[in-house]
Image (cartoon, rainbow, N blue to C red):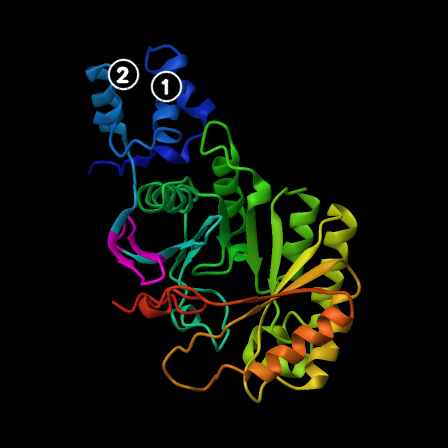
């Protein structure tokens, strides 16, 4: 039985160079192929036009390029684009291009399904099927960059890891993908234009700090009261707010970079004065800002958007306490591309 071919993009540049030397060729051939795979985004070995036909055949005999395919693209009335992305094993994830007047942002997925159990999130209703590989994360960004240039006339400016999955539960692959995205041999994007959003895995937040990452950190918080947070994000019982706060204090002490809190306000869940006061106390230990995010229903009506009065209360109290706050209106709701809605409905 023929051995399964290896995904060539799982090899480092050094391993590619060694492969060519081991097959009687020059090491620089590995550099050429590596450039085709990453900065030039080759989908097949036939695309590698400065490589001989015999070399392309040798690559074909030994490797595959497990490139993603956009199975379906939907465009919202507000310019948002959602891609249903088919992976090499026919699993599907979703990624989103979010345009504004000044920037275009890619919202990318890191897992097929999700490891966590946030009750307000459609993705959480899918069991985690597997982690995405670094190249599958990278490919989502390349596709959205191309769409940004085609439909909005400018390159992609920002990336947020806020799609399907918990990025810190796929730690190594996410960091490898970001390394490629920020490398001059990849897309050359600044790490300061990348935000990794976590639901709050304390041990991995500390590891981010120890690894001296350069990208920004956001935390999907939604309540600074343990009892409330555990009802909407049950995993909070294993990672309580005291542990999360300790990890974030560690992050700030190591990186001196502020923390962004993503926060949805729901009717009758976290829309009282005590909820705001708890959030203010939680924000005080390190420089931070709060993004109040409009809620996007996921069919069953268990969660409902809070009143404008509740949002105004949050904004007023946070600002009076010197905490930067932004109210984020969701984009792409008409195509289920908004925050919390990604669930592969097809």
Location of residue 71 in the rendering, given as x and y in whole percent from the top left corner: 23, 53
Secondary structure, mark 1, is helix
Can residue 5 be seen here?
yes
Instruction: Give the quarter of the image for residue 73.
Output: bottom left
Task: Measure how far apart labels 1 and 2 are at the Cα level.
Answer: 8 Å
Q: Name the residue under label 2.
A: 51
Residue for point 54% across, 50% down: 171
Give yes or no for residue 72 being in the magenta stretch: yes
Q: Nearer the viewer, residue 290 or 93?
A: 290
Q: Earlier in the sequence, mark 1 or mark 2?
A: 1
Q: Mark 1 points at which residue?
A: 32
Q: In this view, does 176 lie above or below 251?
A: above
Q: Do the residues labelled 1 and 2 touch (CB within 8 Å)?
A: yes
Location of residue 264 in the rendering, given as x and y in whole percent from the top left corner: 56, 74
Q: How many marks?
A: 2
Q: What range is drawn magenta here?
A: 71-90
Residue for point 76% across, 48% down: 256
Q: In this view, does 301 lie above or below 292?
A: below
Q: In this view, does 266 lie to the left or right of 135?
A: right
Secondary structure, mark 2, is loop
Location of residue 219 in the rendering, given as x and y in whole percent from the top left corner: 61, 62
Q: Is residue 180 above or below residue 287?
A: above
């Amino acid at each position: 039985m023929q051995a399964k071919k290896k995904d060539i993009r799982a090899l480092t540049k050094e391993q590619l160079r060694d492969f060519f030397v081991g097959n009687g060729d020059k090491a620089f051939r590995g550099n050429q192929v590596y450039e085709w795979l990453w900065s030039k985004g080759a989908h097949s070995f036939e695309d590698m036009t400065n490589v001989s036909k015999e070399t392309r055949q040798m690559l074909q005999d030994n490797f595959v390029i497990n490139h993603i395919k956009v199975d379906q693209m939907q465009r919202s009335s507000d310019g948002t684009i959602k891609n249903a992305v088919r992976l090499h094993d026919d699993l599907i994830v979703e990624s989103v291009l979010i345009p504004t007047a000044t920037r275009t942002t890619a919202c990318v997925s890191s897992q097929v399904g999700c490891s966590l159990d946030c009750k307000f999130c459609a993705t959480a209703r899918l069991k985690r099927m597997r982690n995405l590989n670094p190249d599958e994360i990278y490919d989502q960004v390349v596709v959205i960059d191309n769409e940004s240039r085609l439909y909005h006339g400018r390159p992609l400016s920002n990336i947020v890891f806020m799609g399907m999955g918990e990025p810190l539960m796929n730690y190594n692959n996410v960091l490898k993908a970001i390394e490629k995205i920020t490398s001059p041999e990849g897309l050359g994007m600044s790490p300061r234009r990348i935000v990794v959003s976590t639901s709050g895995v304390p041990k991995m937040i500390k590891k981010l700090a120890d690894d001296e990452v350069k990208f920004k950190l956001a935390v999907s918080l939604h309540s600074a009261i343990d009892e409330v947070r555990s009802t909407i994000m049950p995993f909070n019982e294993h990672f309580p707010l005291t542990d999360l706060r300790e990890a974030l204090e560690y992050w700030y002490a190591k990186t001196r970079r502020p923390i962004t809190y993503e926060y949805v306000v729901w009717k009758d869940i976290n829309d009282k004065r005590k909820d705001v006061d708890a959030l203010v106390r939680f924000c005080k230990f390190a420089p931070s800002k709060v993004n109040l995010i409009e809620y996007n229903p996921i069919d069953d009506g268990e969660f409902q958007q809070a009143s404008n009065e509740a949002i105004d209360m949050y904004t007023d109290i946070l600002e009076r306490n010197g905490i930067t706050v932004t109210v984020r209106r969701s984009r792409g709701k008409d195509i289920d591309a908004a925050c919390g809605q990604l669930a592969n409905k097809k």
